[in-house]
Amino acid sequence: MFKRILLPIDGSENSKKAADKAIELAKELNSTIIVTNIMDQSVDLSYNEQEVKSNEFIKKIVDLILKNNINVESMVLFGSPTYDIVTIARKSESDSIIMGKQGINYSNSRVIGSFTEATLKNVDLPIILI
């Protein structure tokens, strides 16, 4: 367990904190981190705008992981963050997930974000929330 850690990111501060925790754990366990960003098809930004932002998020985190001499893979998907995380977890052969409890578009009235809640409900893997 924790040999292939899935790290969904969205550019939020919680994503950065989750990346720091994934790096810490990966160093201890000699794990691979799979960084992913799901470009939300329901957002009002164009595909190209989302792709630029997504690639910026991914590059920043991948560079940080590589600087720590950790194996890393990355993937970007255009779809629904709520539903596609299951597919990504399966296709990447992840055995665990580390993610922020709230993302970039969280509401102060929620304890956890909607994407995090959906992940908890739909993915049958150990999940660490940061």
Image: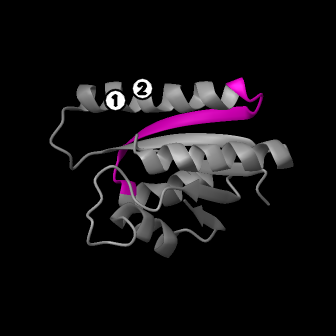
Q: Main secondary structure of the magenta part?
A: strand
> Circle 1 is placed at which residue position?
53
Return the x and y of residue 15 as percentages of the image width and height: 48, 47
Return the x and y of residue 126 as percentages of the image width and height: 66, 68
Does residue 120 lie above or below 55 as drawn? Answer: below
Q: Secondary structure at mark 2?
A: helix
Horizontal side, residue 103 vs residue 7: left or right:
left
Query: What amino acid is found at the position of numbered circle 1 in the picture?
Result: Lys
Q: Nearer the viewer, residue 37 or 69?
A: 69
Query: Residue 20's quadrant in the figure?
Result: top right
Return the x and y of residue 22 as percentages of the image width and height: 66, 48
Does residue 105 lie above or below 111 as drawn? Answer: above
Asked if residue 76 is among those painted magenta in the image, a careful observer would answer: yes
Circle 2: is it few (<14), some (14-19), or many (20+) Cα within 10 Å? few
Query: What amino acid is found at the position of numbered circle 2 in the picture?
Result: Glu
Do callouts 1 and 2 mark residues in contact (Cβ within 8 Å)?
yes
In the rendered image, the residue lying farthest to the left is 44
In the rendered image, the residue lying farthest to the right is 29
Q: Secondary structure at mark 1?
A: helix
Query: Residue 56's quadrant in the figure?
Result: top left
Colour scheme shown:
one colour
From mark 1 to mark 2, how far is it between C-alphas? 5 Å
> Circle 2 is placed at which residue position?
56
Does residue 30 lie above or below 52 as drawn? Answer: below
Horizontal side, residue 95 vs residue 119: left or right:
right
| Magenta segment | 67-81
Instruction: Report the residue at 77% width, 28% height from top.
Output: 69
Does residue 33 lie above or below 59 as drawn? Answer: below
Asked if residue 61 is among those painted magenta in the image, a careful observer would answer: no
Instruction: Report the residue at 80% width, 42% height from top.
Output: 27
Quarter of the image with the N terminus is: bottom right
